[in-house]
Image (tube, coloured by chain):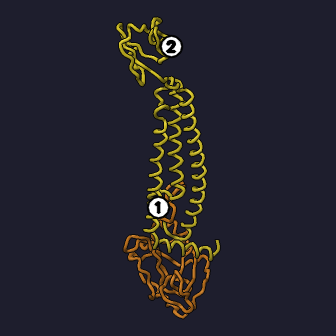
Chain colours: A yellow, B orange
Amino acid sequence: MTAQSDRRWAELARELEFTQLDELRRQAEGWRTGLTGLTALLAVLVVLKGRDDLNGLPDTARLVASGLVALAFLLLVAGSVLAVRAAHGRLGDRTLLAGQALRRWTEEEVRRVVTSLRWASVCCVAGVVCAAGAIGVAWVETESPKDHLVRVSTTSGERCGEFLGSGRDGVSLRAEGGDAGEGAKAKRVTLPARTVISVTPVGSCGAAK
Amino acid sequence: MTQPPPPSHRFDTAYADADLGEVSDEFTVGPSPDGHTLVRGHCPRCLGRTATEYRHGVPGTGAGAGTKGPPASDAALLAQERHFCECGHPHPQLPANAVFVGCGASWRVRALVTPAQSGNPTGTPNGTP
């Protein structure tokens, strides 16, 4: 280090004494913005709702999707925090405001910022990939809901299933269970017209059959 | 104990960006009245009494990150610093934007001593203003 370089560092350290409050305010604003952005990550969890509700998945797929969502969330949080730290520094620490101390700190800080940014980008890309994977698993493994579901009340009870048509013979449904019992593959059932009391459209069959 | 006679401040020394290298003069380090760190001694060039106060602060985008091991003491850090004449006297040809008001000299010290080690517990250096 030349004397001229040392002088410049010392002068910079001296100037910093007079800009502390502005510097802290800038740092606080940066962290506030970063922490606010973190809350947006909750959208990763909110996205997997409705048709992509993980509860509607088979066990294995649900475990895989849940794991991917959790991993994505952690990676995105870590990436965001690393990016904020790289941009706005670590809060709370102070150093001696002297030329050579400031020079050493700057060299360390440059190395740390580069490392933080590298890891932040890795975490964010990996997090997005995990989130996309979870969404993909949810979409692939979720069955489409059946349309045209009706609940038919008859003199002997209720049946629920996909409405196929009606005529002189009665009301035709594609319903699960039936004579083969619960859990059997859906099959066409015709309920005689003389036994039908009412036909009601429903969103899902639920427990009633 | 007899104190050495105070050096005479050379007020007419012209300002110059002079690197004096490592000097063997005695400089003390200790707390300043408002709780910061104060380095005091006599400028080896103009012989004026010089005192520089060092504070702790936030350098910019954070601080202290990446440092390994326990933090060094202020005295240890300041022993590695280049020190500048801050005798406070506007020497001839002093630039208008000079950050350090003095004769312009800078130097490194072999070691910094505490006021107690220097035999002057008050930390007040002998010498002319």
Comparing A88 with B103, the one in front is A88
- Real-space Cα separation, disc 1 to disc 2, in angstroms: 63 Å
* B33 relative position to B71: left or right: left
Q: Which residue does the numbered mark 2 point to in the structure image? A: A186
Residue A60: % across, % down? 53, 24
Q: Residue furthest top?
A: A179
Residue A175 in view (yes/no): no
Q: Is residue B11 above or below residue A195?
A: below
Q: Name the residue: 55% across, 83% down.
A: B44
The reply to the same-chain question for discs 1 and 2 is yes
Mark whose residue sits in front, 1 or 2: 2
Quadrant location, the C terminus of chain A: top left
The amino acid at mark 1 is Gln
Find numbered disc 1 in the image and state the secondary structure of the residue it sits on: helix
Instruction: Please tell me how crowded label 1 is: few (under 14), some (14-19), or many (20+) other residues with Cα within 10 Å.
Output: many
The amino acid at mark 2 is Ala
Chain under label 1?
A
Q: Earlier in the sequence, mark 1 or mark 2?
A: 1
Q: Which residue does the numbered mark 1 point to in the structure image? A: A27
Q: Is residue A124 above or below residue B15?
A: above
Residue A153: % across, % down? 36, 13
Chain under label 2?
A
Find numbered disc 2 in the image and state the secondary structure of the residue it sits on: loop
Disc 1 vs disc 2: Cβ atoms closer than 8 Å?
A: no
* A91 relative position to B13: left or right: left
Comparing A177 with A37, the one in front is A177
